[in-house]
Amino acid sequence: MALPFYPLVFMHFLFAATTLCLARPSSLTAGATVVAAVVWIFGNGPLEGQVLWEFDATHGLTVSDLLSVAALAIAVWTFATTGDRPWVRRTTRRRRKLLRSRY
């Protein structure tokens, strides 16, 4: 009876992260969506569904894997559309702004 408990928790984590990413787009929520998508791929065991494409006898693309693909697409879209870029240095922008305001 406890077999589908953890996959259901992972699925709810995926849905909550994706919904939050759509409601409040930022790099933080997009990162949480990527983490949830990766966790869902490895933790969706009993809820996988039909195999759509077989890689070999033991591996394949299932219906539930498409949820991760959709969540990753939403996260990539959020990273692309928001101005949040954690890898961009913000000090140079602030320094230029200070120099403009002084002179």
Image (cartoon, rainbow, N blue to C red):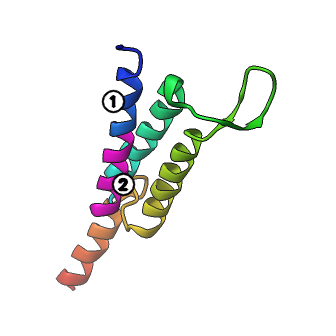
Residue 6 or residue 38, whichever sits in front: 6
Across and down, in percent, residue 53 comes to 76, 39
Name the kind of residue labelled 1 in the image: Val
The answer to which image quadrant residue 8 occupies is top left
Q: Are marks 2 and 1 in contact (CB under 8 Å)?
A: no
Sequence-wise, which precedes: disc 2 or disc 1?
A: 1
Q: Residue at x 39, y 52 (%)?
A: 30
Residue at (28, 62) in percent of width and height = 23
User: Residue 28: percent from the left, percent from the top?
Assistant: 32, 50
Secondary structure under tag 1 reads helix
Indicate the quadrant where residue 52 lies: top right
Q: Distance between the residues labelled 2 and 1?
A: 23 Å
The chief SS type of the magenta part is helix
Q: Which one is nearer the viewer's eye here, 27 or 89? A: 27
31 over 77 or under it: above or below: above
Q: Does the magenta stretch include residue 19?
A: yes
Looking at the rendered image, the quarter that the C terminus falls into is bottom left
Residue 64 inside the magenta-drawn segment: no
Residue at far right of view: 56
Give the residue drawn at x 34%, y 61%: 22
> Quarter holding the N terminus?
top left
Q: Magenta region: which residues?
A: 13-24
> What kind of element bears circle 2?
helix
Q: Mark 1 points at which residue?
A: 9
Q: Is residue 86 above or below residue 82?
A: above
Reply above or below: 75 against 15: below
Q: Which amino acid does label 2 sit on?
A: Ser
Pointer 2: what residue? 27
Q: Residues within 10 Å of mark 2 (few under 14, many from 20)?
A: many
- List x then y, in percent, for residue 4: 40, 22
